[in-house]
Image (cartoon, coloured by chain):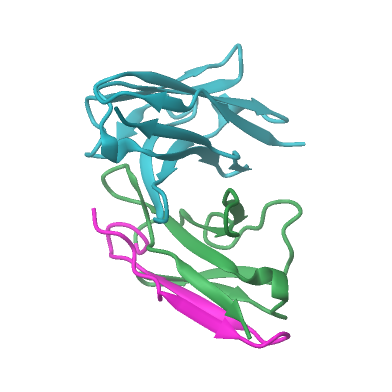
Chain colours: A cyan, B green
Amino acid sequence: EVQLVESGGGLVQPGGSLRLSCAASGFTLSSYWMHWVRQAPGQGLVWVSRISSDRDGSNTIYADSVKGRFTISRDNAKNTLYLQMSSLRAEDTAVYYCESDVGWGQGTLVTVSS
Amino acid sequence: QSALTQPASVSGSPGQSITISCTGTSSDVGRYNYVSWCQQHPGKAPKLIIYDVSKRPSGVSNRFSGSKSGNTASLTISGLQADDEADYYCISHTSSGTSVFGGGTQVAVL
């Protein structure tokens, strides 16, 4: 069964850092383009970042709102996707999902507040 | 990158068919066959129902179908059921390499 499980969310102060993980099972994560998407409370889905498959060069790209602050990466040995978030702002508060053409994870909540 | 345009809401009676449109530009929807749709019930994580314009993941009902014409993609739900009441989002790859979501469509089953 294909599964994506996010973890690492929590409460962090403005300016702080957090690393989200997305553990994949049932498929090889490096064979797919993987995305991070977020959803602020009561709002719609917003694309955050993407890493392409190994075959396509593992290229990364970011939404303007997080460029220079967030870093997407992948550990093929652990079949896990990451999102390193730094210089966090209140407006980064959201549920963060990893997703690809095989499905979506259940999300992890990030709250940025003092 | 501007969000893709979806109707705010669509409604239908049980058993009917409804179609949700997703309008982009020649730089996203019109350029690539990389349009996906997801379904989100209140308080739940999104669920992928269509990818690559018209492909259905394993386990997704064939009542859901996708298509594209020019800069507009469409999701059709046939044989509408009470459990189809949810929010639906389209997503497209863009020429800048990013992805962009639609604003979401709330489907009501009357």
What stretch of residues is rendered in magenta? B1-30
Task: Indicate whether B62 appears above or below B1.
Answer: below
Check the picture and name the quadrant holding the N terminus of chain A. top right
- Give the residue at x 54% y 34%: A32
Q: Does residue A44 appear anywhere in the picture?
A: yes
- Give the residue at x 32% y 37%: A92
Check the picture and name the quadrant holding the C terminus of chain A. top left
Give how far across and how far down residue B32 sits, in percent. 40, 56
- Give the residue at x 28% y 27%: A88
The answer to which quarter of the image holds residue B80 is: bottom right
Give how far across and how far down residue B2 sits, in percent. 25, 58
What residue occupies the far top of the structure in this picture? Answer: A77
Question: What secondary structure characterizes most of the magenta part?
Answer: loop
Question: How many discs mark residues in the rendered view?
Answer: 0
Q: Is residue B19 magenta?
A: yes
In the picture provided, is A113 more to the left or to the right than A51? Answer: left
Give how far across and how far down residue A34 sits, in percent. 49, 34
Give how far across and how far down residue B3 sits, in percent. 30, 59
Q: Does residue A57 appear anywhere in the picture?
A: no
Q: Is residue B49 magenta?
A: no
- Give the residue at x 37% y 45%: A47
In the picture provided, is A2 more to the left or to the right than A75? Answer: right
